[in-house]
Amino acid sequence: MHHEREKWNRKHRDGVGPEVPAGIIARFIDQVPPGKALDIAAGRGRNALYLARRGFQVDAVDISDAGLNLMAARHPRLQRICADLDRFDIPAARYQLIINIRYLNRRLFPYIVQGLAPGGFLIFETFLESGGYGDDTARRPSCRDHLLRENELLHAFLPLHVRYYAEHGVRRPNWPGPLASLVAVRRVCP
Ligand SMILES: C[S@@+](CC[C@H](N)C(=O)[O-])C[C@H]1O[C@@H](n2cnc3c(N)ncnc32)[C@H](O)[C@@H]1O
């Protein structure tokens, strides 16, 4: 854990990674009524801050205190939680919205489903193994544990009502690699 924190602290201090919110969030956020939101692996807070400004009460969890400090006092509706997600339990039925962008921890999948309030939304987007989409680049995780397999995200969240799922192989300058994106809702009646 210490090693992981140091690694990400260095990256965040160096300013690695995008500053604007993820496009998938901006695209679907109008469908989500404001309420309590959880940002899993919030980094420097580009997505958490966007949600707070849109009226969500956001819990932003990350292992990197440097990343979280970079978002310090930037919004009163944003609560920073410095924690290791390998040990973090998401409270049941708490969140109207859970976002998980560019991070993969399969242990959390069942907690994410349970953590949504009935009618709550999940917006999840992270890297895929490159299979068929093109070359890997240095800007995406190198370890397979942090890369999704084809259709994996879709299958993992079938207990929810999947509203949108796509695997993108788009290549453009500075594009870190193929992504899978999912938007899903917890049913009000199981
Ligand atoms: C690629 S960044 C993505 C940050 C943010 N979601 C975004 O889209 O800008 C991955 C984040 O995962 C965090 N992270 C990695 N391992 C973690 C762990 N075990 N517990 C909590 N956060 C972790 C890192 O500190 C980093 O901020």
Image (tube, grey):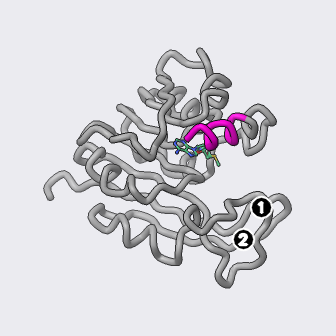
Is residue 70 positioned above or below 142 on the image?
Answer: above
* Residue at disc 2, secondary structure: loop
Q: Which residues are magenta?
A: 1-9
Q: Which mark is residue 170?
A: 2
Where's residue 29, x and y in %? Answer: 48, 45
* Corner quadrant of residue 94: top left
Label 1 belongs to which residue?
175
Mark 1: which amino acid?
A: Trp
Taking the spot 31% from the left edge, 56% from the top edge, the residue there is 110
Give neighbour class at mark 1: few <14, some 14-19, many 20+ (Cα, 10 Å). Answer: few
In three-dimensional space, the C-alpha distance between marks 1 and 2, rounded to whole angstroms, equals: 8 Å
Main secondary structure found in the magenta portion: helix
Q: Quadrant of the N terminus?
A: top right
Residue that extends furthest to the front in the rendered view of this protein: 2
Q: Residue at x 69, y 34 (%)?
A: 9
Quadrant that contains the C terminus = bottom left
Q: Is residue 98 above or below residue 108?
A: above
* Badge 1 or badge 2: first in the primary sequence: 2
Label 2 is placed on what type of residue? Val
C-beta proximity under 8 Å, tags 1 and 2: yes
> x, y (%) of residue 161?
30, 63
Q: Residue at x 36, y 32 (%)?
A: 36
Q: Position of residue 60 (x, y in %)?
A: 49, 32
Query: In which of the image's four quarters is ligand 1 placed?
Result: top right
Residue 103 falls left or right of residue 86: right
The question of residue 163 being in magenta is answered with no
Residue 2 position in % (x across, y down): 59, 37
Q: Is residue 133 left or right of residue 84?
A: right
Q: Nearer the viewer, residue 130 or 166?
A: 130
